Amino acid sequence: MNETLFIVYNILEFLLQSWCNWKMIVLIVDDEEKITEVLASYFENNGDHTYIAHTGESAIQVIDQVPLDMIILDLMLPDMAGEDICQYVKSNYDIPVIMLTAKISIDDKVIGFEMGADDYVVKPFHPKEILIRAERLLPNSHKSQIIIFGQLELHKDERKVLVNHQSIQLTPHEFSILLLLVENPKKVFSRDDIIQKIYSFDSNINPRIVDQHIKNIRKKMKEEYIQTVFGLGYKINKKVINQ
């Protein structure tokens, strides 16, 4: 099975088993299979769910399609620099990144942190150290079950929305769209992005259904919490959130 098919298989597995109460959903990116296997074993034994990528391209595929809580990222990949992947993550998502590297100079560490890395570990290391570092970073991730933006509250477990402490009744798909935007406030999502995230791999969904969901959310919430970015898609409206 080639790596692309393996990734698709794992994403489908996640969608079919999304009810599981994993502590963390972790992506491990390293071109050394032994390292990824050992780290995955430690995280899985801790009650976490892991994805493995051995190239930058396959890592981006997972990052764009799976709601990750943590990324363990090697800097030296065969097709692109780990720093570039880290910068991509930090420009589009709020996911903690732990960088792994054989480089030991202070300049290399400074570059990693400037790219947005949350932590930096020099090889060789003990897998337990990576697990502990990841767990310490977890409270800063989107794992929190209550998300608060100004007067907007999203309760993930109960799938409940409050605006100014008043309950707003959203359909399951409306809630999922709003949650997607709120959890990724830096990113603009196209209709196709939203369909892929919300409806998984159902390619028969009319993209215009997204526009209708957005229209319904806006009508129910009575505020422009969702901003239209002309020609690109939708994002959370930080101007309203910060009022």
Image: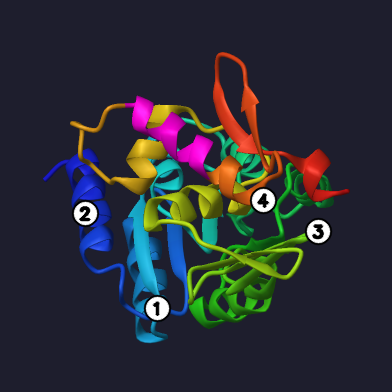
Q: For residue 85: magenta?
A: no
Q: Name the residue under label 1.
A: 22
Mark 2 → mark 3, Cα distance in angstroms: 35 Å
- Mark 4 nearby-residue class (10 Å; few <14, some 14–19, many ≥20): some
Q: Mark 2 points at which residue?
A: 12
Q: What element carries label 2?
A: helix
Label 2 is placed on what type of residue? Leu
Label 4 is placed on what type of residue? Lys
Label 3 is placed on what type of residue? Gly
Residue 103: assigned label:
4
Which numbered disc, 4 or 1, marks the residue closer to the eye?
Answer: 1
In the foreground, 47 or 112? 47
Label 1 is placed on what type of residue? Trp
Residue plotted at (81% across, 58% down): 150
Toward the right, the furthest residue is 243
Image coordinates of residue 232 in percent, x first then y, are: 55, 20
Q: Earlier in the sequence, mark 2 or mark 1?
A: 2
Q: What stretch is highlighted in magenta?
A: 207-216
